[in-house]
Image (cartoon, rainbow, N blue to C red):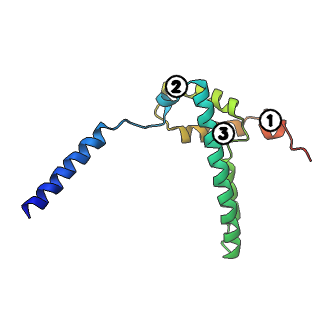
Amino acid sequence: MKRFVTGVITGFILSCSVALATEDLSHNGMFWMGLDPSGKRGYVTGYADAMKISVGKLENLEIAAELFRWKSARKIIRQVSRELRVADVGTENLMQQLDRLYSDRKYSDLDLGSALQLVNLRAENQPGKPRQAEQNPPKN
């Protein structure tokens, strides 16, 4: 029994020391400002692709909500879907907006996901500035 307890304590101490020694992977303003332009472009593009997939999953949820007659589901799902659409703003515009946001020190601890959503909402609420989807309408 003593060997078991000793093994558990040793394992706990080793796992704590490994956890403390690992690199902090916080994706915040410090991380963003440390990226070069191609890294920033890749991050924003990957994030936008992930959000497209999430929006697709929400469309499946909308079908299920109608099947189970979930009241007000359409309104909630469309709101969440609208907030997830970052690709409409444009990669270069998002990069510039994030650079501007993170240049203010008070936003340096804001994680990149929240910052992208904030930038997306700000771009959406700017009157007179067309979004990328409106600038380049789809061809029929």
Residue 98 visible in this rendered orientation of the protein: no
Residue 95: name its quadrant.
top right
Q: Is residue 126 above or below residue 74?
A: above
Q: Which mark is residue 120?
A: 3
Residue 117 place in picture, x, y as percent: 61, 42
Secondary element at image label 3: helix
Between disc 1 and disc 3, whose residue precedes? 3
Residue 133 screen position, x and y as percent: 80, 41
Q: Position of residue 131 (x, y in %)?
A: 77, 37
Q: Quadrant of residue 3?
A: bottom left
Residue matched to label 1: 130
Q: Kindly identify which residue carries mark 2.
A: 33
Q: Amino acid at mark 1?
A: Pro
- Please provide percent x and percent y for residue 27: 48, 36
Disc 3 versus disc 2: distance between alpha carbons? 19 Å
Left/right of residue 118 with respect to residue 78 in the rendered view: left
For the point 56% across and 24% down, the residue is 36
Q: Residue 121's quadrant in the figure?
A: top right
Q: In the rendered image, is residue 112 in sight?
A: yes
- Name which residue lies at 44% across and 37% down: 26
